[in-house]
Image (cartoon, rainbow, N blue to C red):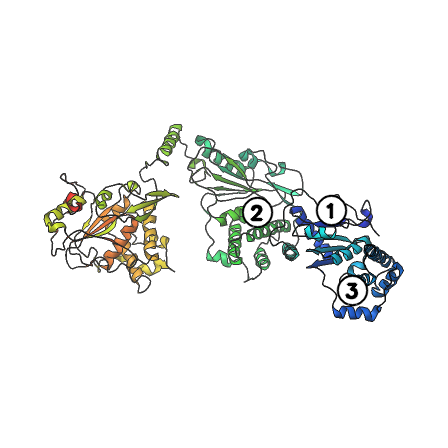
Amino acid sequence: MLAHQKISNLEDFFKNINNRSPKGIYFYRINGFNPEINAFIKKYYDLARKNGVVLEGGIANPTNQNLAYYQETMGTGFQMQETFIQLSLKKWLPRMNPIQCNAVASSIYYVLDSLRKTGKSDSVLKNIYVKFFCWLYYKFERVTSQLGNNQVPKILYEGDISNHELLLISVLAHAGSDVILLQYHDDKNYLKLDAQSKLSENLILPNMTNFPEGFNLKKIRQELQQELNQKRLYGDLPDITNCTNAWISGDIFEDIRKAPAQRGQDTRFFYNCYCRVSGVEEKQTYANKLYHLYSDLKNSGRHVVVLDTPLVQPDAREVSAIQRRNSIKLEDMIQDLAFNLKYPANLQLQKIVIKNFIDIMLEESKKPDVNINKLMNQGICLLCWLKRHETVLLQNWKVPDISCLIYLGGCQNEKEALFFKFLARLPIDILILTPDLNQQCCLQDDLLYEQHHSDSLVLKQFPRDISEIRVATTAYHAERELDTLLYQDSGIYRNQQYQKADIITLRTTYEEIALYWREEVSLRPNFEIMNQTVYVPVLFAKICGVKDSDVRNYWDSVKNLMAESPYVIYRPPFVQPNANRPMLAHVTSFLVQGKLQKEKIKNDKYYSYGFLRPEIQEHMLDKLQLLLDQKVIKGTYENGTEYIIIATILHLDISLVREIQKFDFTKKNPKLIYILANEKVISLEDSIIMAFLHFIGFDILFLVPTGYQSVEQYFQKLEIQEHQIGQYLYDLRPPDLRKYAGKPVKSNPFGNFFRRKR
């Protein structure tokens, strides 16, 4: 019999018997987990599956059929003698050679003799003996036939072992088999059977923890199968791989300039760098520094691509050029996409690109929110972007060539980030520049080397030509820094500081309207700036009746409102239904699957807002989209009303457009007063305009002395706060209020209109 030995490390398990010193077998139980143990179990499981036995869930007791076959073959005799056991084994397991029979017989006899010395009767010993023989025949025949070979057979047992199972496995261990017991629930049950740990050793390694929830051999089997599938997926691996950043000095601009042939001498690697520089070291010279870097790289013969705008999404033509099938399995989908990576003139490059594409896709597939369809779309996007730039970046590549890609502005979304992670593992230098510290790059990668500077600089375009460089003076930069200090989180705002705004509709008391009507929006409740978007609190209310039936005071109060409002509408309709709207004939092409085609609208010859600031045009089109999405107007996406909405908003009165153009989202917002003094109701077109201006950020008051439902007819999902202030009066004739626009009345402003009735 072979003696149990202690290992010096887990790799001892995989040594042949002749290479073990001292010679012996290893019988260990594992009660804890760490990455080293995880890798060992995978390797040991694979060997036990090929060259031994894997036992999941214990060993079932012999069945009646098993016992009947044993008695038919071996009879009912039993002698407590080693020679009897040896001869019985030879008959029962004929594949065993004499040496193997002798080893197993000696080990069985040793175990049975030990039990006899503890007082076990012959009938008990016979039952154990028969059970051993049945188990050897039905479970361990592959182990017994390999005992004594130079390659030691393996037994892997999962779970809490029973007494008889432990005894038989101990028999096989002494006869020449390695054994591992995987125990997920500590060592207590085992120590009840072998209190002194005479039969096996408890494995102790640094940093061991409890087994992870759900860990078992089934999971190991699945992981091994997945690894096998991945090996098939990769095919032939490249002979060369990336050595990224390990060679750099930390002076990034000089490291990129360094000739690839001088970066390292190990022929197993190509040497590239993958860096991001945030902020600038010196504002005055930064643009000039970038130009000279670009010029030096080009003059050295390097292939260089510079990007200073976000990557444009692949168009239909690019996507259709990517060959793929509707695959259900992840590996099949990745293999289909990888088939598009062909470089027949350079098979080494092809292997490099394919391997790293597969690496990136498999890594991405492990994220919890990724499914196969989303991953396929990301993979198609990677391939399309690579094909756009590969003619420069990978043109005539050979070792040790390294091309260079410079991206000014940083990654704006996860697809861009994934693309640069992919490129960074190819023979390409990647330099990401974010000089404007307010512009964040979303790329996260352990391989990325980062450098941070405290100064910030807005640079919209990479200086590829010396004529493109704009040098700012020290005084100019100092003024910009002071500007930042004054207007960053201070409650003070620069003119037109923000370009995006959303509204918050204020619900107020009637008396509060006077206060908020004349205040800047930044002083109103719930004003907030978040993620460069201003949340503008606005008034949107209907005031019914005339206080105390005092018509004179009523109109005087409206004159006071005009002190803050340049715009008043006396009666509907403000926009005539038959008004000339040239873009009405084109509006069906401006809306595709509920989405405005903004560029098509802007390029239309009848588009009349091209003179506005670009951010105001975007603001208006965004709110038009919101008006459609929220279906504020009755009939939207039901009877073609959406096209009337688009045509109406694209033909606003020029005076309204001017109010929108000058709207500064942090200061006073535009106002509009709509007076409905008779039986007429607001028209569809007027309803559209009022809802749109509300979303733009206008304060809007509907003055309805009659109390009629003259405002609500076309609104579907837009709640107007209503205030009842006095008696209903009819057929009032408003005076000419336009001459009071922007001219505050000196006596008792707002007093009459908003005074609480006593």
Query: What is the distance, in whole Å, between disc 3 and disc 2 at their CAs?
Result: 65 Å
Mark 2 and mark 1 residues within 8 Å of each other at the beta carbon: no
Secondary structure of residue under mark 2: loop
Secondary structure of residue under mark 3: helix
Mark nearer the N terminus (2 vs 1): 1
Mark nearer the N terminus (3 vs 2): 3
Residue 592: give x, y in percent of width and height. 38, 59
Tell me the number on the disc at residue 394: 2
Query: What is the distance, in whole Å, between disc 1 and disc 3 at their CAs?
Result: 33 Å
Q: Which amino acid does label 1 sit on?
A: Glu
Nearer-the-camera pick, 682 or 701: 701
Left/right of residue 442 with respect to residue 628 in the rendered view: right
Q: How many labels does the image show?
A: 3
Q: Is residue 742 above or below residue 62?
A: above
Q: In this rendering, does residue 650 appear at all?
A: no
Nearer-the-camera pick, 748 or 522: 748
Mark nearer the N terminus (1 vs 3): 1
Q: Which amino acid does label 3 sit on?
A: Cys
Nearer-the-camera pick, 461 or 168: 168
Q: In this view, does 338 lie above or below 561?
A: below
Left/right of residue 669 with respect to residue 191 in the rendered view: left
Q: What residue type is labelled 2?
A: Leu
Name the residue located 55 percent from the left edge and 60 percent from the top edge. 324
